[in-house]
Amino acid sequence: MKVGVLALQGDVREHARALASFGAAVSAVRRPAELDAVDALVIPGGESTTMSKLAIEFGMLDPIRKRIAGGMPVYGSCAGMIMLADRVLDGRPDQQSFGGIDVTVRRNAFGRQVDSFEGAVVLTPFDEPFHAVFIRAPWVESVGPDVEALGRVTDGAAAGRIVAVRQGNLLATAFHPELTGDLRVHRYFVEMARAAVDG
Ligand code: GLN
């Protein structure tokens, strides 16, 4: 299975390393032809306003929307979650997302003064809690009926907030599993994508 990492901006290399450790053939995706060559896509953390701008400049907005509509498995972390959300609060007025997940996310939700936050997240697919790193992260304010809330913050002021969601072949986390060495989310995505691609 070929997994692309959207390489317009963000922490591309960390995701590529995590995906390769599960035997996926990983490539960087910047152009429509590179998107055509992959079976699944990861959208990294970074800055969603910049990613949105570059996606428009590189002619990637519509091609990615079409692949999402066609059922391509996609995983987005942090800015990637924002790019997969149907609705974005506290975004820039001209900010576009690819959409696909019927959620409303709030950018920089953990507080503008707090750059990062670390805490335990309970993720329904896993037995043990996940130590999650949030960097100027969004959270999910509301979910549509077809969205599964996979994970919530367990402690601190954000306790109870939804920070991981899945809708069909689309997966998103507000945190950055690619930065901590706990690769359960990437394994989950690769297995989910293999099941979708192999039928
Ligand atoms: N605050 C960023 C945004 O709005 C996301 C931060 C991140 O990806 N670490 O896109």
Image (cartoon, rainbow, N blue to C red):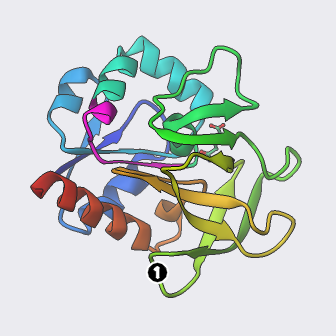
**Residue 121 appears left or right of 148:** right
Would you place residue 115 above or below residue 152 in this image? above
Q: Report if residue 76 lies within the magenta region.
A: yes
Would you place residue 144 above or below residue 55 in this image? below
**Residue 66 appears left or right of 182:** left
Q: Residue at x 36, y 51 (%)?
A: 168
Quarter occupied by the N terminus: bottom left
Q: Residue at x 75, y 62 (%)?
A: 117
Residue 173 percent coordinates (x, y): 54, 56
Question: Which residue extends farthest bottom?
Answer: 127
Q: Is residue 130 visible?
A: yes
Q: Residue at x 58, y 48 (%)?
A: 78
Q: Which residue is mark 1?
A: 126
Q: Is residue 1 visible?
A: no
**Residue 57 appears left or right of 81:** left
Q: How many marks?
A: 1
Residue 137 percent coordinates (x, y): 68, 49
The answer to which of 156 and 125 lies nearer the viewer is 125
> Which stretch appears magenta?
67-77
Residue 52 percent coordinates (x, y): 52, 23
Would you place residue 103 above or below residue 190 in this image? above
Residue type, label 1? Phe
Q: Report if residue 195 lies within the magenta region.
A: no
